[in-house]
Image (cartoon, rainbow, N blue to C red):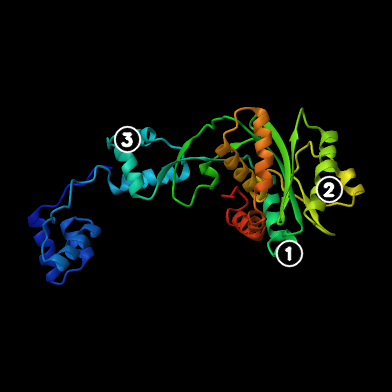
């Protein structure tokens, strides 16, 4: 890792003289016992600048050698959560002592930024394979197909809350590389839980869930909210219902009895459900109104949900194929959506 000893000026001149006499790089290297790469560098410098001495440097010499930089970059690519102190310890063990600020500056100069790791659902191999199959099966579907889908999900909306963060070293477009994310489990807590649905034509009903949801409650929610929403949104014949594979969503017989076609869905895939974007839209709208208690929170949520323009819903559905392309590009792992 340390710097090699520089050649004397007399030796540099002799290298150039031998090259002018017609001697090749390898032969000069053998005669003078100097590496071929160094011979080449000195001769190239002479040809370009007509000099063999070192040219004035633009600033202080770098504290970390190119080899040390390569080691750092290799480490953060393989383990993005590596801290600056850990990198400094690795360099110290190799003979180079630098501070954490130098480590950070070097990484930034090479395109890495310290960012909070994205929280994504924990994906096992079966989940990844199911996501890839879903994306491949639907990649060529026309926009008209997605316009017939009624999307649904639950969410929890809090009055207050904080999320833990973790920093990783990553490049600009690598936020959703599995190594740069923090796996989370669905429904990490909140004040009020809602069920909602929407289609390309607009939002459906928003229902507050009270108590612990089970299969019976879920079927009641579908009866009182899904069917009225489908009628209000004028879904017509042949519409498709989307819901995830939550164990509480036990309504197979009820759905079959009511002749509702259900989309096959890959587990742990909120990024494939555009209603997640509407939940975000709703939470931003609600936060601006600053509810002070749960009663206000429920009222404001329902008011703001109904105000979301149909154009917003339509845009999410029209661009749905981009989600599928992103899943395939990221080999089945979580995407920015």
Disc 3 and disc 2 in contact, CB within 8 angstroms = no
Q: Whole-Å distance between the Cαs marked 1 and 2?
A: 21 Å
Q: Secondary structure at mark 2?
A: helix
Count of numbered tags = 3
Looking at the image, the residue that sits furthest to the right is 257
Can you give x and y, in whole percent of width and height, for residue 142 in the image?
71, 65
Disc 1 and disc 2 in contact, CB within 8 angstroms = no
Discs 1/2, front:
2
Discs 1/3, front:
1
**Quadrant showing the N terminus:** top left
Q: Is residue 98 visible in this depiction of the protein?
A: yes
At horizontal 75% and vertical 62% (from top left) the residue drawn is 145
Residue pointed to by mark 3:
100
Reading the chain from its start, which is encountered first: label 1 or label 2? 1
Say if 320 sits above or below 179 in the image: below
Asked where in the image residue 159 lies, by quadrant, the reply is top right
Q: Is residue 124 visible in this depiction of the protein?
A: no
Residue pointed to by mark 1:
144
At horizontal 70% and vertical 56% (from top left) the residue drawn is 200
Residue pointed to by mark 2:
227
268, 82: nearer the viewer: 268
Seen in the image, is 275 located left or right of residue 225?
A: left
Q: Secondary structure at mark 1?
A: helix
Question: How dense is the environment of label 3, judged by Cα within 10 Å: few (below 14), some, or many (20 and up)?
Answer: some
At horizontal 36% and vertical 32% (from top left) the residue drawn is 85
Q: Whole-Å distance between the Cαs marked 1 and 3?
A: 55 Å
Question: How dense is the environment of label 2, judged by Cα within 10 Å: few (below 14), some, or many (20 and up)?
Answer: some
72, 110: nearer the viewer: 110
Q: Secondary structure at mark 3?
A: helix
Seen in the image, is 195 located left or right of residue 64?
A: right
Say if 49 sits above or below 173 in the image: below
Say if 50 sits above or below 192 in the image: below
């Amino acid at each position: 890792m340390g710097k090699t000893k520089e050649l004397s000026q007399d030796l540099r001149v002799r290298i150039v003289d031998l090259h002018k006499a017609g001697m090749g790089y390898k032969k000069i290297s053998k005669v003078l016992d100097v590496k071929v790469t160094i011979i080449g560098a000195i001769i190239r410098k002479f040809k370009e600048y007509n000099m063999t001495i070192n040219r004035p440097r633009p600033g202080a010499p770098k504290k970390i050698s190119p080899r040390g930089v390569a080691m750092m970059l290799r480490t953060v690519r393989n383990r993005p959560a590596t801290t600056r102190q850990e990198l400094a310890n690795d360099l110290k063990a190799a003979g180079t002592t630098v501070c954490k600020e130098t480590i950070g500056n070097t990484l930034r100069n090479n395109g890495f930024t310290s960012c909070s790791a994205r929280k994504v659902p924990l994906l096992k191999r079966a989940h990844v394979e199911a996501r890839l199959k879903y994306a491949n099966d639907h990649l060529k579907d026309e926009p008209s197909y997605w316009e017939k889908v009624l999307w649904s999900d639950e969410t929890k909306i809090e009055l207050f809350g904080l999320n833990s963060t973790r920093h990783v070293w990553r490049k600009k477009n690598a936020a959703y590389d599995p190594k740069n994310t923090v796996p989370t489990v669905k429904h990490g807590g909140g004040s009020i839980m809602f069920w909602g649905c929407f289609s390309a034509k607009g939002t459906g009903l928003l229902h507050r869930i009270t108590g612990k949801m089970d299969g019976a409650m879920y079927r009641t929610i579908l009866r009182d909210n899904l069917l009225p929403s489908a009628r209000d949104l004028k879904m017509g014949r042949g519409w498709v219902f989307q819901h995830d594979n939550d164990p509480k969503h036990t309504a197979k017989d009820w759905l079959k009895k009511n002749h509702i076609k259900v989309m096959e869905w890959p587990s742990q895939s909120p990024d494939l459900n555009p209603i997640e974007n509407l939940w975000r839209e709703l939470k931003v709208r609600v936060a601006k109104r600053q509810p002070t208690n749960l009663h206000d929170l429920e009222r404001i949520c329902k008011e703001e949900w109904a105000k979301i323009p149909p154009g917003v819903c339509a845009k999410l559905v029209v661009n749905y194929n981009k989600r599928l392309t992103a899943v395939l590009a990221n080999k089945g792992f979580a995407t920015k959506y």
